[in-house]
């Protein structure tokens, strides 16, 4: 099992010292069976007067920082060492009664908020994966939808806040990883699957994973999880077309993507005081 070393640095710059309100962080990976956090360090400057940790209803780690000092720079640096076990997904893993869709849903999975009705265009697209009689092979449906989004939709980094609506992503056939994930969740929810949004980190193997490598952006990621009778929650990454958790580190699983923001908070000063926010993320493999 590889050991991943994850460094996530966010820095806010201001023209002069400003005051800070409460900041909420979701940076520590989940305690799931296929990923075990070995070490964690969170350095914040200026030092908060209070730092508290909680876990929400879905088991995500949430940190809250409060400040009593003003500063012209606010920096959050999270360093994680994590033991990661790759979990694949095969047709044989699916419970016998669920290998052909539709099937009777299990009731023992964690709660998922009732989905909003999908746009008619998304409904039609989702139903296009079914046979004329409304049935299909469950494994083929899930893998086929994942790979269709990968091959038929353009994947582009989008730095604007928020997420496109699934119908808009379908219309323009383009979006970020989070847009693709939300489309897949909306389509599968329409068909009756329990599906949820996942945010975390993606490991991209390269030749410069040594400790001297410079932090590089682009390693935060979002994908979907679908409950499948037999294996339970399975990761599907439509942005890459992959199935299973290969090279994926879960930080937050949520019913609403707005609840998976890695870092959010407030500051007090003039609007002209804000200069920039810089984010640097690196996920590297290390020896055990």
Image (spheres, rainbow, N blue to C red):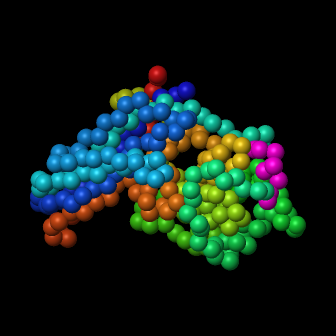
Residue that sits furthest to the top in the current view: 288
- In the image, 64 versus 84, the foreground residue is 64
**Position of 262 relative to 201 (above/below):** below
| Residue 117 is a magenta residue | no
Question: In the image, 115: left or right of 72?
Answer: right
Q: Quadrant of the N terminus?
A: top right
Whether residue 129 sits left or right of residue 260 in the image: it is right
Q: Position of residue 67 (x, y in %)?
A: 17, 53
Q: Residue at x 72, y 64 (%)?
A: 191
Q: Is residue 262 left or right of residue 85?
A: left
Q: Quadrant of residue 134?
A: bottom right
Position in image of residue 288 (x %, y %): 46, 22
- Per the rendered image, the range of residues in magenta is 94-102
Is residue 97 in the magenta section?
yes
Q: Is residue 141 visible?
A: yes
Let me know if residue 239 appears in the view. Answer: no
Q: Is residue 17 above or below residue 62?
A: below
Rendered location of residue 10, percent (x, y): 30, 50
Total numbered labels placed on residues in the image: 0
């Amino acid at each position: 099992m590889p050991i991943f070393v994850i460094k996530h640095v966010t820095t806010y710059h201001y023209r002069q010292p400003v005051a800070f309100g409460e900041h909420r962080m979701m940076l520590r990976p989940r305690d799931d069976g296929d990923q075990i956090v070995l070490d964690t360090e969170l350095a914040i400057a200026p030092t908060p007067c209070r730092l508290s940790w909680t876990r929400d209803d879905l088991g995500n780690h949430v940190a809250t920082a409060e400040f009593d000092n003003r500063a012209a720079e606010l920096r959050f640096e999270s360093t994680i060492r994590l033991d990661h076990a790759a979990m694949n997904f095969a047709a044989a893993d699916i419970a016998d009664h669920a290998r052909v869709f539709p099937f009777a849903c299990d009731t023992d999975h964690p709660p998922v908020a009732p989905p909003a009705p999908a746009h008619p265009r998304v409904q039609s697209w989702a139903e296009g994966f079914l046979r004329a009689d409304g049935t299909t092979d469950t494994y083929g449906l899930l893998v086929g939808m994942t790979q269709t989004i990968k091959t038929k939709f353009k994947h582009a980094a989008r730095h604007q806040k928020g997420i496109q609506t699934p119908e808009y992503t379908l219309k323009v056939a383009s979006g970020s990883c989070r847009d693709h994930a939300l489309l897949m969740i909306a389509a599968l929810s329409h068909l009756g699957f329990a599906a949820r949004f996942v945010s975390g980190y993606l490991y991209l193997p390269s030749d410069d994973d040594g400790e001297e490598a410079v932090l590089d952006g682009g390693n935060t990621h979002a994908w979907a999880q679908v409950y499948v009778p037999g294996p339970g929650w399975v990761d599907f990454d439509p942005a890459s077309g992959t199935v299973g958790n290969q090279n994926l580190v879960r930080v937050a699983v949520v019913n609403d993507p707005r609840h998976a923001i890695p870092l959010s908070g407030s500051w007090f000063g003039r609007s002209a005081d804000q200069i920039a926010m810089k984010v640097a993320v690196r996920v590297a493999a290390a020896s055990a």
